Every structure is written in C-alpha cells, then in structure tokens.
Image: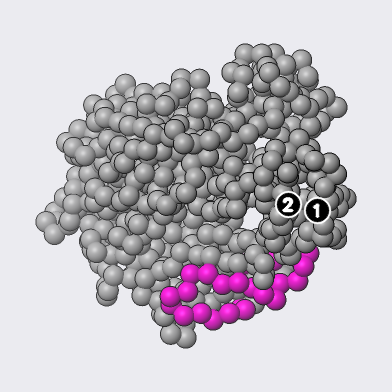
Amino acid sequence: MKNRKGFDVMKNRKKVTAYFVILSMLLPVAKVEVRASEDARIVQVNDCLEISDIVNDNWEEDFFVQKTLDNSSESVGEFLDGQDDDAIFEIEEKGDELEVTAPYQTKRLIVESGDLQEFYGAETVYYNEKMNETYLQFATEEDTKNAYEHLTAQYGEGFCFVDEVFCIDKAICDIDSEDSYYSWGVGYMGMDVLKNQAKDRTDLSAVKVAVIDTGIDEFNFMFKDRVITSDSYNIAAGNGNVKDEHGHGTHVSGTIVDATPGNVQIMSLKVGNSLGLSTTSFLRTAIQYAVENNANVVNISMGMFDTSGRPMTAYDTAIQAAYNKGIPICVAAGNDSVDAKYTYPACNPQTLTVSALGKSGKLATYSNRGNVIDFTAPGSGIVSACNGGTTVDMDGTSMAAPHITAAAAYMKMLKPDLTVEGVYNELKKYCLDLGDTGKDTLYGWGCPNLKSLFQNGIVGGVTGSGTDQDENNAANTASRQLGRPVLQTVSNVKSGIKIQWSGVKDCTGYSLYRRNGNGKYARIAALNRSAASYTDKKAADGKKYTYAVKACLNKDEGAFSNEKQTIRISQPKITKIVKKSKKSITVKWLKKKGVSGYQVQYSKKKNFSKAKSKKFSGKKISAGFKKLSKGKYHIRVRAWSKGGSGKVYSAWSSTKHVRII
C-alpha cells in the first residue's frame, strides 16, 4: 500500500458534504454513522483453512491495488462515476498523476482479540478461538472504515488491521532467456557443490519448504522427480488446486529446487490470483498453515509497502509462532529502492530479510536497503521455471529470497532442530562481506557461500556460531542465543509513553532504549523477563522519541528489536461544557501548544461504543454540537500531531458528562 498522505473520497447520492481540497478542487464525502450490530451473525471457525474459505467467498474480481489517473478534476470525476456509491478511495498526488487506492474494498477487518464487546455494524463475525482472532465482514466500505477507527481507538493500531489487497511483486521483469543455465546464484553461493555432494550422503534429513506465492506449475521439467507435498493448498480459493496462473510462484519454487537436492520438498501455498493480487488475510492464513503443517523453512517473496506510519504488525503473531517453532521465514526486501523498514513483513525482526545483487556483485539498483536487511543474494537475471514448462529470466528481491531459503534448507537438512537464530548465525558465518565491515544497510551481513558447509558441518547446539571475533564478544553471544523482541506499539497514555512488545523465550530480562530526536540510543530501563510493556514517564511534552528493546541473558544483551517513533503529547483537558439550547452544546478545552489538531468524541455509551467524532484544527479551543437527542452524553477529547511517520495521538482526556433533557 502506498503512502497515505492523500485523503478519503466517498460517493453517496443521498447526503454529501465537502470537507477537503486537493489541487484546488473539492471532492464529495458522505457523512457516516456506525450502524448497530445487534443482527450480526456470529460464526465459530476452527482452523485457518476456514478463514481461507471465508475470504475467498467474499473476493471480487474488480479488486485492485492502485490505479493511476491524470491530475485533473475531470479525470477523477470520470473515475468516480464508474464506481459503487459507497466506495472509499485514498488519492495521492504523484507529480502530474494521481495514485488511487481503495483500502476498505474487501469490507473486512482482522482483530487480534477473541473478546470483542461490540461489532460496530459487522454483518458477520468470524471467531477463531485457536488463534484468538476475530474477522469482521461488513456490508459497506463506509461501515468498515468507521469500525476500524473505533476499534483502533479501543485496541490500538497494532491489533486491528484492514484486510487490504496488495500486489505480490510489482517490480519484476519477465524476459525470455536463451541461455542454457539456470540461476547463476546457485554457483555464486556454492550450492552447486553441496547439491552434487548430497548425492552421496544418506544422513541428510528431508526438508519441507513452504513457498507462499501464486502457486506452482508442477509439470514444469524443473520439478521432475521433486516432491510437491500433498498438503500444498490454495489459500486464495480454499482448495487443493495450486496451479500457477501468474508465474511468480513457479519461478521462486524453481530457484529453490535448482539450488537443492531431492530431499527438499516444496509445499506450495497459493495466495495470489492470475493478476498477482493477494490480501492481508490470505498471507496471514498461509503463514499459520505453514506452521501448523510443519514446514521447516518458509519463503515469502512478497510484501506491502506503506509509509503512512501505521503499525505494520498484521502477520507478527503468525511469524512469532513460526519463530518459536524454529521455522525461519526468508523474505524479499522489496523493489522500491527505499528503506525496507517501509516493507512488510520484511521489516519484522524475526524474519530473514534479503536484498538483491546484480550480476556485477553489487546491490541491484531496484533493491530496498536499510537496517532491516539481514543478507543479500543474487536477484538480477535469475533463470528459473515459468508456466508452460519452460524457463524465464526475472529480476527482483523476489528472486533473491529463495536463494537464502535454499541456504536455510541446507542448514535444516544437517540439523533439523536448529533454531531460527541458529540458522541466522550459520548463514552469517559463511557470508562474503560485500560492503562496510560487518553488517551494513545494503548487504546486511553479506551473501553466504556454503561450498564448505558439508565439510565443516554445524558444530555445537541449536544456536550455531559466528566469527572468531564474535566468539569473544559476550554481547554477540547473547544475540546468537536470544531471539529479537518485536516492538508492537508505542503510544501516548495519561502518564507518559507506553511501549509494548512481544517477548522471546529463554531470556532473563529486557533492556529498553530511547533515542531523543536524532540523537543516540540510551538505555532507560532494565526489566524482568515477564515484562511486556513499560511506560516512559520522563518523556517531555512535544518532543520526538524513538524506542527499541533488547532481550537479555544475564548481563549480556541480544540484538535490537525493530524501532518505533512517536511524539509525546499529554492529554488535553476539557474545561467546560456549555448548554447553548435544549439540543445543542459547546465543548471547551485548554489549548495545547504545537499540536496539529483535536478530535472530540461523544456517545451515550460509557465505553464510547457507537461514538460519533469530529476533528478540528490545532487553533480551536471549542466545538459546538447540535441536534442532540435526549439522554446523557459522555464526551472526551484528544490532540494529535504530525510525526515523521504519520499522525500521533495523545491519550483521551478525562470524560465529562452532560444531560440533554
């Protein structure tokens, strides 16, 4: 999903109000209300495949990722005339063009909770007790958007997700190849040597590699005599037909097969259609399925790109389950030539994120980069299987990731119980350092060359080992033995900034780090092993902070988690509620310096379910509300500011009450 600096556009024939401007033109937006949900149908589901069926039943052929329009009111008008009346779009200016997305088109939300007290107008509620998650299916995009705003206010943006449509890989080149060889990366990484040596070995374990993609053309000659497992599944259609109608998944699977011996089996999990489109729920379900069906390694050559600042955590629970089970997930970094921290799930610290090399041995120009890069691998001019039984030459980090997946499979065939950190550190040990000494933002630790892996074997326990220098470094030892926590949310609360994270096994505690503005990280708290959150009560109002956490093993610390940035905004204070007439009131609050705006919410429900809200500029210190019906109203206000990664909200003010007679 692209940058959300645009705005919402909604069509409605009955009641229209204009409230924003783009390029000096007004576009209509309907007033909306959250419908009552007393008639919601509640369905209990028992496994991830039932979720797959539900999503597939609600798939529409006209779903899209983004459309490009001319930068004119006429072009936008023509586009809107052809859309459904209740459709909601986000439009971003890109030079002379406009990029249009439809984030709520699936009319579905995912909430990581099994205890929702309110369904906010959902037609059907699907509760998966096993995964402690709830899927809400709505009748309109309008209802979906409003429910999302209310649920994120209640549960946090890190636990409620829009089921968005995304493109599996929008930056690959399909060029017919006349060469007789397959991936040059196989030889570059020494896996041709290992594949040949494996023929004479009887001690190698079978390895099941889950390829989450567009399916597979299993009749391609590259898959001859290779097991495509019987538990391969079409998540997007809810059946066992994994025939590839796009070609991306076949190419990725072909690279893994090209690099590995016959004991490596392919579990094809199809999440994309013939256009290469998928959804959040398909990918989330596929990861869950791979874990439940005992995959040994997972390849994800896809992702979502989003610079809006919204938390990207929709797959974190499933990734954590894989991590806990010792299943490495190898992920493409993305092909936008930007920081991969904006690409998900590449930015998740428990995945192995892969950038792409060109044939020159340098980083490919299209490849994403940044601190989240773990390894690099050949990604340009990669020849592999394609639909129709032949081969094709493709470019992309999608092509680089399966090389690292194949390398991880070699680790697992030697030592099946190797942990994710063990795989990580074994790969690290064999890396050719291609950039700055140590880990860098282009190549991570570098590109592994495994030609001596069988000769050396894997020595020691399940965690592997690093370089000689690392062996003498206590901090790096802890890093190899401990997983990296996942920072879930950083949000303003009444007493400060609250930081929440997912823990790791076998640690003795956590160290929380904070960076003030653009300064350096400093540790602000040492916490026990049971801690999963901390409130920074010393954060100063209006200041920007970045947080990260490390797991500890006694006095040693592991690797940094992902980082999250916010601005400290203390909660506003309502000073007075004035009755202007029988059915109207004015709410007044103390002005806060430096904020961009305020949001006022009012409801007859004490828990603010079915609440209505209005937003005002940072210059306002009061707001009027008219045509209120009889009853007691609960009213609260919060402030917001524009941070480097999107809007940052304060905690809600204390609730005030007024009765309309």
At 39% from the left and 34% from the top, the residue drawn is 41
Q: Point out the stretch of residues depicted in magenta.
A: 523-547
Which badge, 1 or 2, is on the more N-terminal residue?
A: 1
* Quarter the C terminus occupies: top right
Tally of numbered discs: 2
Give the residue type that dot 1 points to: Ile
- Could you say where residue 302 lies in the image, as x and y percent from the top left? 46, 40
- Could you say where residue 583 lies in the image, as x and y percent from the top left? 78, 39
Kindly tell me whether residue 368 is visible in this rendering: no
Circle 1 sits on which residue?
A: 577
At 71% from the left and 54% from the top, the residue drawn is 657
> In the image, is 2 to the left or to the right of 279?
right
Kindly tell me whether residue 136 is visible in this rendering: yes
In the image, residue 100 sits, relative to residue 487, either above or below, namely: above
Give the residue type that dot 2 points to: Val
Circles 1 and 2, Cβ within 8 Å, touching? The answer is yes
- Could you say where residue 73 lies in the image, as x and y percent from the top left? 78, 19
- Residues 224 and 580: in front is 580
Looking at the image, which residue sits at the far left? 202
Q: Secondary structure at mark 1?
A: strand
In the image, residue 66 sits, relative to residue 195, either above or below, namely: above
- Checking the image for residue 658, the label placed there is 2
Q: Would you call the spot at circle 1 few (<14 residues within 10 Å), some (14-19), or many (20 or more)?
A: some
Looking at the image, which residue sits at the far front? 661
- Residues 146 and 593: in front is 146
Q: Is residue 525 located in the magenta-colored stretch of the structure?
A: yes
> In the image, is 8 to the left or to the right of 384?
right
Looking at the image, which residue sits at the far right? 619
> In the image, is 187 to the left or to the right of 519?
left
| Colour pattern of the rendering | one colour
In the image, residue 114 sits, relative to residue 239, either above or below, namely: below
At 13% from the left and 59% from the top, the residue drawn is 203
